[in-house]
């Protein structure tokens, strides 16, 4: 066991912090979509940074998508403490004098430390290397956890009350325990499909901090006794796939996936599979079929995946964020946080890590993101299977059970709840895989009913009830949820058929 | 990428190269989706010839290979229009004026497709160019400028 400590420590030694100035260029999907490369060239800031001997680091979006294109200057002093200052929306201009001053190591510190902790703490801080990730704590939890026995770890996960971050909130500890008690071989499937419109937090996590996911995977594989893990990533998330594959290569090359780091008798193979579209491909049993080479349609449940998953063997299926969150559970007071994807009528849309233990109100969160509350009639929480939260409920606290996978769209005064509801119904209709009748036919009929000028609300409710009860998976089961919520919260939007 | 065309001079070479790469994948059913991806990466779509080759290598009946391919919305079973752009029409992009952008830029409909979500809602409205590059926070002027550049290419 001492060898493992020495091993990780050796990696840390290799990247020991030196007094230096660094220029982080946020070149994630957000930066690239806002022409960060040409903007930096036009402003000449890379040349300027090089003339001051600053290290140029290409990094991911730090979750503050609204700031793109942006760069961050970081200085590390003689004591190894880091100070950073971000320059936002540099396409609109940059104060070059200030930029120079911040970057110049000889000036006094007039910059601030963001102090971000938790799941997103390494977003926008890494240069894509394993060394940088290890320096900022990657794999240090696994190193400690590998000194414990599997039973202790399973118990820890269970008592932490960690629940699935993909939207279903199933207790993670129970899931791991159920799979572990069945005879192997066992599999782990990481659900990184994220095909729900309005949700982009897993992509950010994979792009920004893939080593956190790998660490979570290793802890799960050790605790449950898994030898083969699949990461099923949305096929359109090219940068996320590239980032994950690079991180896996690094982990292999540095021995993180080998006997140098892993406990005795543990071996694990991690394979990345790209999906090929379809909202239903985020459903866990569909992913199993897809990996096996079958048609991507849902399976009947039971049996559940923990009993009979991939190739009929016990399988743990966890969302990316769930496994990443595992790495935070051994902190002194693990924060019950949730990554959310915020878009729409706010000044600062992006990926936020919010406390999800009922300590923050919607009002507070929206204000922090730059929303003008009087211009926000409602929120759409959770996309095509989500609900509308009207303004009179913004005093309510944010709780995990209300935010699904974490997609939050902020409506504006111009938004039409009815048009959005119809658009979501149309999306569910197009995305239905057609395997079961309640969903295949139900989504078509629901769309048609909603498109009438006067809507037969009674019929709509009856249809939704059938779809909820009889659909094979949650796409059909929850397709009527936004419709029900819209009718309940915005009754004036609908002209009902006079019976 | 120029889509594979069975009447083009290079059709035989492109298919042969794809087949050569396909043989590297293990000949088991689990590699069906990776095989589809390989075909689409190399040929830009899944022409019938590629379905036959995949069926043969993975030893899966042709009908099953085809049926599975039809179930994935991102797999193209028809030859795509070369150089098409895709405008995101998700909730956030619609709210940010995606439809107004489509109306404002005078582009042939087959050159400007629509997709349900590009998952970059924080930079809406968003579109994807013919190289697959995502462009965010679009304005009509910016889209027109991109298209002019594209035509210039």
Image (tube, grey):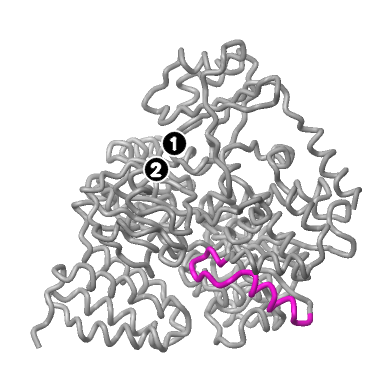
Residue A403 place in picture, x, y as percent: 42, 62
Residue identified by numbered label 1: A68
Task: Give the farthest residue toward the left.
Answer: A498
Relative horizontal placement of residue A364, taking residue A355 as reference (left or right): left
Residue B146 quadrant:
top left
Disc 1: host chain: A
Q: CA distance from mark 1 to mark 2?
A: 10 Å
Q: Position of residue A260 (x, y in %)?
A: 88, 51
Q: Can residue B107 be spotted in the picture?
A: yes
State the image coordinates of residue A146 (x, y, percent, origin top left): 81, 58
Instruction: Report the span colored magenta.
Output: A163-183
Label for residue B136? 2
**Above or below: residue A212 compared with residue A490:** above
Q: Going by the image, does A169 lie left or right of B150?
A: right
Mark 1 vs mark 2, foreground winner is 1
Q: Is residue A363 above or below residue B52?
A: above
Q: Residues within 10 Å of mark 1 (few under 14, many from 20)?
A: many
Left or right of A493: which side holds A262? right
């Amino acid at each position: 066991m001492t060898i493992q400590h020495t091993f990780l420590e050796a990696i840390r030694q290799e990247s020991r912090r030196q007094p230096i100035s660094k220029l982080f260029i946020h070149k994630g999907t957000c930066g690239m979509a806002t022409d960060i490369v040409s903007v930096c060239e036009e402003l000449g800031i890379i040349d300027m940074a090089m003339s001051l001997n600053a290290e140029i680091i290409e990094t991911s979006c730090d979750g503050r998508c609204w700031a793109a294109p942006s760069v961050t200057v970081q200085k590390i002093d003689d004591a190894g403490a880091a100070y950073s200052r971000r320059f936002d929306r540099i396409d609109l201009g940059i104060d070059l004098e200030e930029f120079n001053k911040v970057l110049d190591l000889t000036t006094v510190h007039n910059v601030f430390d963001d102090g971000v902790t938790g799941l997103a703490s390494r977003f926008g801080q890494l240069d894509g290397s394993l060394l940088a990730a290890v320096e900022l704590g990657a794999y240090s939890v696994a190193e400690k956890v590998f000194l414990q026995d599997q039973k202790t770890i399973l118990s820890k996960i269970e008592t932490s009350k960690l629940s699935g971050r993909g939207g279903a909130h199933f207790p993670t500890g129970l899931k791991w325990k159920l799979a572990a008690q069945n005879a192997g071989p066992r599999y782990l499937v990481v659900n990184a499909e994220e095909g729900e419109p309005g949700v982009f937090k897993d992509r950010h996590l994979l792009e920004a901090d893939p080593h956190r996911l790998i660490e979570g995977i290793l802890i799960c594989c050790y605790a449950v006794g898994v030898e083969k893990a699949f990461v099923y990533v949305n096929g359109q998330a090219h940068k996320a796939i590239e980032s994950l594959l690079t991180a896996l290569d690094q982990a292999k090359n540095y021995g993180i996936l080998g006997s140098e780091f892993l406990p005795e008798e543990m071996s694990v193979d991690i394979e990345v599979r790209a999906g090929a579209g379809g909202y239903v491909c985020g459903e866990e049993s569909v992913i199993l079929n897809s990996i096996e080479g079958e048609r991507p349609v849902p399976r009947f449940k039971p049996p559940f995946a923990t009993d009979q998953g991939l190739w009929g063997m016990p399988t743990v299926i966890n969302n990316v964020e769930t496994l990443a969150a595992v790495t935070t559970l051994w902190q002194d007071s693990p924060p019950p946080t949730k990554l959310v994807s915020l878009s729409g009528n706010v000044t600062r849309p992006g990926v936020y890590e919010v406390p999800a233990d009922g300590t923050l109100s919607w009002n507070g969160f929206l204000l922090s993101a730059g929303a003008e509350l009087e211009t926000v009639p409602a929120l759409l929480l959770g996309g095509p299977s989500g609900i509308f939260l009207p303004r009179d409920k913004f005093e309510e606290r944010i709780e995990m059970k209300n935010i699904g996978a974490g997609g939050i769209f902020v409506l504006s005064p111009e938004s039409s709840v009815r048009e959005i509801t119809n658009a979501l119904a149309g999306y569910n209709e197009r995305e239905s895989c057609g395997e079961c009748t309640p969903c295949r036919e139900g989504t078509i009929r629901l769309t048609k009913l909603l498109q009438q000028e006067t809507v037969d609300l009674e019929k709509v409710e009856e249809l939704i009830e059938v779809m909820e009860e009889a659909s094979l998976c949650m796409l059909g089961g929850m397709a009527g949820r936004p419709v029900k919520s819209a009718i309940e919260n915005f009754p004036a939007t609908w002209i009902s058929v006079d019976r | 990428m120029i889509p594979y065309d069975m009447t083009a001079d290079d059709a035989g070479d492109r298919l042969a190269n794809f087949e050569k790469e396909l043989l590297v994948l293990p000949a088991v059913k689990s590699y069906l989706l990776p095989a589809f991806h390989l075909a689409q990466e190399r040929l830009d779509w899944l022409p019938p010839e590629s379905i036959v080759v995949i069926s043969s290598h993975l030893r899966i009946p042709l009908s099953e290979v085809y049926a599975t391919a039809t179930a994935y919305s991102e797999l193209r079973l028809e030859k795509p229009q070369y150089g098409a752009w895709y405008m995101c029409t998700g909730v956030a992009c619609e709210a940010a004026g995606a439809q107004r952008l489509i109306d404002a830029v005078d582009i042939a409909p087959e050159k400007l497709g629509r997709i349900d979500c590009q998952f970059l809602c924080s930079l809406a409205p968003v579109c994807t160019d013919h190289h697959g590059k995502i462009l965010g926070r679009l304005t009509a002027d910016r889209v027109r400028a991109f298209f002019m550049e594209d035509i210039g290419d």
